[in-house]
Image (spheres, helix red, strand yellow):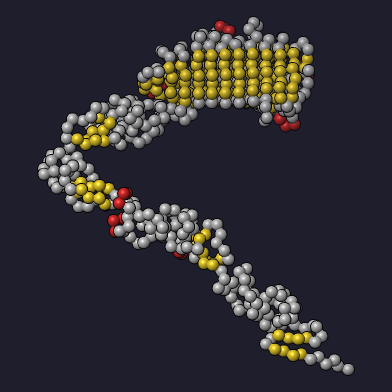
Amino acid sequence: MSLLVLLVACKGRIFDLKGTGGDVDGDGYERSVDCNDTDPEVYPGAEETCDERDEDCDGAVDEDIAEVVFLDADGDGYGDPSSKTTACSVTEGYTDRGKDCDDTRAEVNPEGREVCNGWDDDCDGQIDDDDPDVDMATATTWYEDKDGDGWGSATGATARSCSQPPGFADNADDCNDNEASVEPTSYWKDGDGDGFGNPDEQVNTCDQPPQDYVDKPGDCDDLDALTFPGAQELCDDKDTDCDGNADDSGLASFDDLSTWTDVSADLNGAQGDPAEWISQEKGVLHICAGTWFATLELRHNVDVVGHDAPVLDAGLVRSVIYLEDGGLDVELRDLELTGGEADGAALGLSNYPAGGGVFCRGASTMVLDGVRIQANQGYIGGGLYVEECEVSLVDSSVVLNNTIWSGAGIAVTGGSLELQDSEIFRNDAGNNGGGLYVGDNSSEPQVTLTDSLVHENSAALLGGGASVYLATLDCTAGTGDFGFFSNTAGEDGGAVHFYEDATLVSKGCDWGTGSEDNTPNDLSADSGSFGDDENFTCTTDGGCN
């Protein structure tokens, strides 16, 4: 027996007498007319809201509700008309006003102030003098120029406008506005007395010039008497000759603290025949970019300053830097020292040539900052030799140096050495102390390493990283990988070999582990194997604790 179902339909609305049928979302509209029969808020005649949905099923989304907005790139409250779009609200970076004629300039918009600048500041289609609303306070005063010589009259008519009107000049300096051949002379302020004036400080006069004014412009630094057109270019990181080029490559200059002198020719040697520069007085030697085949002997308080990382190459003839006098205070900065063949006499013995890169003997002070000592050689102290001097290395490196005997990187037989943020690596000694040799029979030298790294050095016999004899080596490290890694000795003391009343102190230094361990051991005489951030003190008599 069939069940009779009565369906009564009106305007698409249905009444299912069984409570089932074609209205899934229960909004009273069957799916044949409901454009989304899974959403009870969507059906024909529903109220349209701004939510990117077609609630009333008329085929349009957010019609008559969404706002028209414009991108406002310059943030002045007006947008680019070509960026028109719609949105439910005005969000950051947009505006509902779209009449900006230049959306890259915040001062340009329909509310802008028209000024004399060549722009339509108020977006009314009129620029500068063509706009009756232009702010005349920004206009220029022009002076009548009857004779047309470019010089205006102080007593003639004047005009105010953005652009120069015909028959007017931008000055009132003419000596006779009825005679074009009579005109004022221009002078420029010469603040440093070098005969050339500042182009930005000009006067035009029919009379004598004011004091300190000259008739030649073009000084690019009117506070420096050494800088003017045609001046001798110097190694000073300045455009000394005012030619627009501050590149001082290939130049060297000496400043005796009162006068600068070009010494480029004095340092211009050749491969195998390096120039030998010997200081004659205290001062600062400036060396600019390039490779210089030259060696320096410092007999006075002289600082040597590199500009753009110059290279001093001794051509395997003698030490690159040589200092033997006491009582001096010198600094080497931002240089590379290479090709040195040691010719200093270690401990006064000529058969012990020392200090291929740097030889420092005598009670003097030397600071090396940003210096790279590379590929030098000698019998002892291939890179650096220190005897009695107090030497500091800061942010420097000693690399690929070698010796027949000891201290391929650095040898210290007296005085002291401090390394800060520096590196000693890949140096090779034919005997002891690949990276460092520290020792003497009398003066008990002191070496301190702070946040520095000694790695990949080698010695044929003892102390791949360092050999310490009758001396003290102090290694201190903060956060980071600092200490002795991957050093190799042929017999003993891969990192450090110490003997004869030597002392080794580690304060937080790393001593290599795994593939970075030292070979054949960390310390001589099987004093122990150490890892990272170690704190200990070792002596030849008492072992390590």
Question: Looking at the image, which residue sits at the far bottom?
Answer: 1
Identify the residue at horizontal 70%, vertical 25% (top origin): 509
Q: Is residue 269 visible?
A: no
Q: In front here: 542 or 22?
A: 22
Question: Looking at the image, which residue sits at the far left?
Answer: 179
Horizontal and vertical percent position of residue 181:
12, 41
Query: Disc count in the image?
Result: 0
Residue 519 is left or right of residue 49, and the answer is: right
Horizontal and vertical percent position of residue 460:
67, 19
Picture quadrant of residue 348 = top right
Picture quadrant of residue 216 = top left
Horizontal and vertical percent position of residue 101:
41, 60
Image quadrant in which the N terminus is located:
bottom right
Q: Is residue 361 above or below residue 127?
A: above
Q: Is residue 223 visible?
A: yes
Residue 316 is left or right of residue 257, and the answer is: right
Horizontal and vertical percent position of residue 119:
35, 55
Identify the residue at horizontal 62%, vertical 68% (top origin): 51
Q: In front here: 410 or 32?
A: 32
Identify the residue at horizontal 15%, vertical 39% (top origin): 175
Q: In front here: 424 or 105?
A: 105
Q: Is residue 77 above or below residue 306?
A: below
Identify the residue at horizontal 58%, vertical 66% (top origin): 88
Residue 529 is left or right of residue 55, and the answer is: right
Q: In front here: 116 or 397?
A: 116
Image quadrant in which the C terminus is located:
top right
